[in-house]
């Protein structure tokens, strides 16, 4: 029965709402949210790195962490959950623009992130990310980056830095590692997402609008961490993103003691 099948799919969407790839597959079957997914995919394609031949990407870290990444047991990649990054405003700049209000909701994510940069000798970054300039800068092997980027659950992306133009209330992309046409395309796709949300919620009451917003938040977790405020554009950040939803074999997650709290890290 077609109606029963659709009902089952709708129930699965609610039960597994944080599994964004799974939800997209269901929506494709139901022919729902196709325009939304098109914009999400376009943004990912613009920011995704496929050629590493001219990139020298490195990672600032403390010496104690460096020893965990490179030791007698080999080398490891350590990733942080996308909702536990250093910046408390991580991803919220994009969401605030799309939703038109301050955004404070926290949504879980299956994505883990490692930060890279092309800037190898920045005093602010030495101070912020290398334990007060006492740490190290690790440079990634280009072949290694190419190999992991070809895994079905890993992508390497440029971070886009955005600012809000107070005169026209429009966003601008301030990234130094993007072509002008890519910046224009990103703004277009972000505005498409904003227009979609506004058109779908214009006739809803406050409760219904919040429910629609919740649905959008789940979908936007695929890209919200690829955007930061333009204040950080000097970092020229890239990100290795591991989507654990698409990883079939067991992943190693370790909790490391911290004076303030315990962070779960993903080791690959």
Image (cartoon, rainbow, N blue to C red):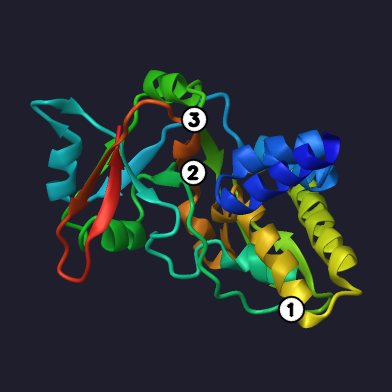
Q: Which mark is residue 153?
A: 3
Residue placed furthest toward the front: 1
Q: Residue at x 73, y 62 (%)?
A: 172
Q: Residue at x 79, y 46 (%)?
A: 185
The local crowd at label 3, few if under 14, some if 14 to 19, many if 20 or more residues have their Cα within 10 Å, is: some
- Tell me where residue 80 appears, x and y as whole percent: 35, 50
Residue at image mark 1: 207
Q: Which one is in front, 21 or 47?
A: 21
Q: Which one is in front, 168 or 205?
A: 205
Q: Residue at x 78, y 34 (%)?
A: 29
Whether tag 2 and tag 3 are in contact, CB under 8 A, the answer is no
Q: Residue 225 occupies which quadrant of the picture? A: bottom right
**SS label for mark 2:** strand
Residue at image mark 2: 238
**SS label for mark 1:** helix
Compared to residue 171, the image places residue 110 above or below, namely above
């Amino acid at each position: 029965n077609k109606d029963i099948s659709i009902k089952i799919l709708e129930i699965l969407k609610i039960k597994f709402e944080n599994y964004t790839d799974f939800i997209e597959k269901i929506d494709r079957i139901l022919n729902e949210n196709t325009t939304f997914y098109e914009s999400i995919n376009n943004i990912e394609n613009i920011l995704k790195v496929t050629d590493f031949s001219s990139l020298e990407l490195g990672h600032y870290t403390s010496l104690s962490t460096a020893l965990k990444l490179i030791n007698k047991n080999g080398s490891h990649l350590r990733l942080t959950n996308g909702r536990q990054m250093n910046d408390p405003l991580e991803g919220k700049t994009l969401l605030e623009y799309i939703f038109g209000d301050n955004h404070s909701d926290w949504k879980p994510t299956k994505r883990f992130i490692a930060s890279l940069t092309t800037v190898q000798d920045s005093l602010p970054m030495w101070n912020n990310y290398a334990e007060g300039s006492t740490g190290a800068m690790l440079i990634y092997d280009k072949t290694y980056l190419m190999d992991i980027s070809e895994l079905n659950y890993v992508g390497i992306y440029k971070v886009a830095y955005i600012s809000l133009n107070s005169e026209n209330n429009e966003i601008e992309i301030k990234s130094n590692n993007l072509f002008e046409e890519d910046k224009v395309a990103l703004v277009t796709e972000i505005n498409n997402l904003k227009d979609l949300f506004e058109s779908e919620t214009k006739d809803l009451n406050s409760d219904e609008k919040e429910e629609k917003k919740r649905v959008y938040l789940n979908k936007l977790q695929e890209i919200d961490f690829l955007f930061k405020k333009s204040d950080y554009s000097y970092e020229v950040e890239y990100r290795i993103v591991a989507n654990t939803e698409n990883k079939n074999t067991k992943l190693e997650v370790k909790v490391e003691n911290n004076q303030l709290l315990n962070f779960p890290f993903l080791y690959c």
